[in-house]
Image (tube, coloured by chain):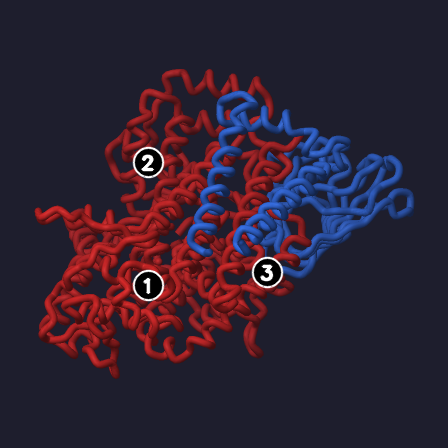
Amino acid sequence: MRIRITIAIGLALTVVAVGVALARKPLVRAGTDGTPLPTEVGATPAPTTVCQGEETVPAGTTAIRVSMLSLMGPRLKLLARSQGQVVTSGELGYGWTGSIVSIPVARVAGTHPHTTICVSLAKRRQLVNLRGANTKFAPAVMGGKQVLTGRMRFDYMHPNDKSWLALALPTARRIGLNIGGGAGIVLLPLLLLLSAAALSSWLLVRDLR
Amino acid sequence: MSKRAGTRAPKTSTAPKGSTEKTSKASIAAKTSSTASKASTAAKAPTAAKASKGATAPTAAKVATTPKPSTAPKIPGRRGRSPANGRTEAAPRKPPRTPPRGRYGRAGSASGARPNRAWKAIRGIPTTAWVCALVAILNSVCWSILIPPLQGPDEQAHLAYVQQLAENGKMPSGSSEENFSPEEQTAMNDLGFGEVILDPGTPSLRTRAMRTKLEHDLSQTLSRKGDGSVGVAASEPPLYYALQTIPYELGSSSTLLTRLELMRLLSALLSGLTVLFVFLFIREALPAAPWAWTVGALCAALSPLLGFVGGSLDPDALLFVVCASLFYCFARAFRRGFTARMASALGGVVAVGFLTKVNFVALLGGVAIGLILLSIRAARVSRREAYRSLAIASGIALGPVFIYALINLAGHKELLGIVSGSIKTTENHDIPAELAYIWQFYLPRLPGMPHDFPGLIPAWNTWFKGAIGRYNWLETVFPGWVYKLALIPTAAIAGLCARELYVSRELLRRRVAELATYALMLVGLMGLLAAASFDSYPTLALADSEPRYFLPMLALGGALLALAARGAGKRWGPVVGAGIVMLFLSHDVLSQMLEVSRYYHPW
């Protein structure tokens, strides 16, 4: 009986965790500076600060994605200023991986054009690649003096107005696009997972009593 | 070893180089009887009673030394009443077998005709093991559906390797370039491969138009032949890829994506086989509490990392099978004797390992020591037999290496082929610096060591977080608080495991040779991963620091989880065991949801 109760509690907690996850709202793009990413505009192994002006931070932004590439990235601190005022700030710990890194920031109340965004990279020995496009328009500046060959891309993220649960059908359609079927195809992994859970529970009840 | 880093990050370049029964049915019944006195083989109860505190040896001794399972138990080992390999001089080579019954063992063939050994062995595997394997397969298939095409670890390179074997009938050229076949290149372009990897903000196929274009392009008559370059898979042996040509050919009339899904299904079957061997290993290593076998094997089956690899086209899937079967063979040999047949099995597994993935060489130190220790124990009974077994195991194991060297010699290439290049790379290493790097790859820096990872704690940032969840190209992660929360159950499981190990310390002392073998295999793997990572340092740090590379130790991991459940005591052990399995199930479900949120989020 105790095994059955343990399994029931475990399954119930799993369902609760799934419910909480589905109630969250995914981050979507509120805006972007639209810089394409065909090339590398700089790279730095040393602790430094990279600043880029002429950005527009939309209202509601809660995370800013920066086109930096690293396999084990350094600690990052982001500060956005507009006309001498701090628009928002945020930081991300060591160990991120990706070609675009998302830094959570304090929610931005209003839209702020002509903002300069500075990202400080903590001490590391490994290169961090700054990706973007070559341009002479307001290129990024590294270490306060080294003008880079172009601009990086900044994307401004905010929570979607719908939860994952509300987005279940479009998400299922997108899964179907990848597998090559309709939205109904998601029933297959769902059934597989439920079968695995049912078989596991049956084994536990059978063998652990 | 996979060189994902180089593939994913061409700008940072410098891809790193180089990159773990038939249980006698009498025995199964005896083990079962240790906790289930209701089992039919009640005559074995004395042995089981001795084994109930985790003792593992008596069963084996009984199997090998006694003409009938019901005779008095004998303890193998140095101070045991029976010889080291578990046999008495007068003992028959094979004990008579009492068909066991019950949930952990099934009756074998009762026919008078001499049955096929393999078939009997398969029939001797308990139903629980098969169900655990089925759970692993279901889990992996589920992952295979959720991982978009070519987004598995280095999947584009592995696909190119299979295609090279299937379409050109030749081994890859050895180039790590990615000049794949026009068919694969088209698929990569249409899938937006370059944009999707490493960027969690970019989902996979987003619109119906993208899918239509992909299907249209792949339906054209595109050449399936590349120039022989297979990217980072170039240095890998061919066995897994050769196996994958079967589903590839089965789907030859369909599109590349269908063939890829068929190949992923084979990987899923291999993950089931891995869990089958994990179960058999735990049964052999920890015979006292049969319920704990289920706990360990189910945890392995529900491991998200196993599902992730088993749901992809990745030679690791076969490596895991090889390593789990290797652990099983060693556990069986240490408990039941180093017979010629067991030597053949061990040699065969090692040979298959050589043909599966370069990473397997990391286990060779432990394998060699294990074989020597087994031989020393067996030599106490018969030196000749011991040497014969050692020769058989070594001969079979090294067979592929000799053949490979001969082929290289005949082709006027380096004697050890691609491995020669890796050896040359290490010749220029600064040994003290490399040792310091290897230490810091896992452990806190010691005074006097250089700061190789300033600001980073690899044990936390890489290994723990990786074990909890860093999927795909390592860019798919849980929110930060999840890792901190995961510390609580992890610490509880570690504490229970430590308690059980402490309680069983006398037994551990008696099995030190066996444990040393496992430990050496683990240390060897740790050393190889760190050393391979050092090749690309300091341009890259912690390359090859992917926890999936430790899944060859899945059998050990399963055994530790089984021990943790036992650590809660007889009364609460099964409850805690069920709780641990539920924890793994929950982790798996949430990991798959993370995968969905990564690739199928709103755009």
Q: Local crowd at mark 1 within 10 Å, few (<14), some, or many (≥20)?
A: many
Residue at disc 1, secondary structure? helix
Q: Colour of chain B?
A: red
Q: CA distance from mark 2 to mark 3?
A: 41 Å
Q: Earlier in the sequence, mark 2 or mark 1?
A: 1
Q: In this rendered view, identify the residue nearer to me: B272 or A42.
A: B272
Q: Specify the subunit that label 1 lies on.
A: B
- Color of chain A here? blue
Q: Label 2 marks which chain's residue?
A: B
Which residue is more in the foreground, A61 or B71? B71
Rounded to the nearest angstrom, the CA distance separating label 1 from label 3 is 32 Å
Which residue position holds label 1? Answer: B33
Q: Give left or right: position of B81 versus B422.
A: left
**Picture residue at 40% right of the left edge, 54% below the top:** B19
* Vertical placement of residue A201 versus A192, above or below: below
Which one is in front, B64 or B531? B64
Q: Which residue is mark 2?
A: B162
Report x, y in % for residue B492.
58, 65
Q: Nearer the viewer, mark 2 or mark 1?
A: 1
Task: Look at the numbered disc 3 and give the secondary structure of its residue.
Answer: helix
Q: Residue at x 35, y 23 (%)?
A: B223
Which residue is located at x 58 percent, y 78 percent? Answer: B447
Q: Is residue B122 visible?
A: yes
- Mark 1 and mark 3 lie on one chain; the one further toward the N terminus is 1
| Discs 2, 3 touching: Cβ within 8 Å | no
Instruction: Tell me the residue that label 3 is attached to.
Output: B489
Give the amino acid type for the residue marked by disc 2 in the picture: Val
Q: Position of residue B476 (x, y in %)?
A: 59, 44
Mark 2 Cα within 10 Å, few/some/many (few <14, many 20+)?
many
Q: Quadrant of residue B524?
A: bottom left
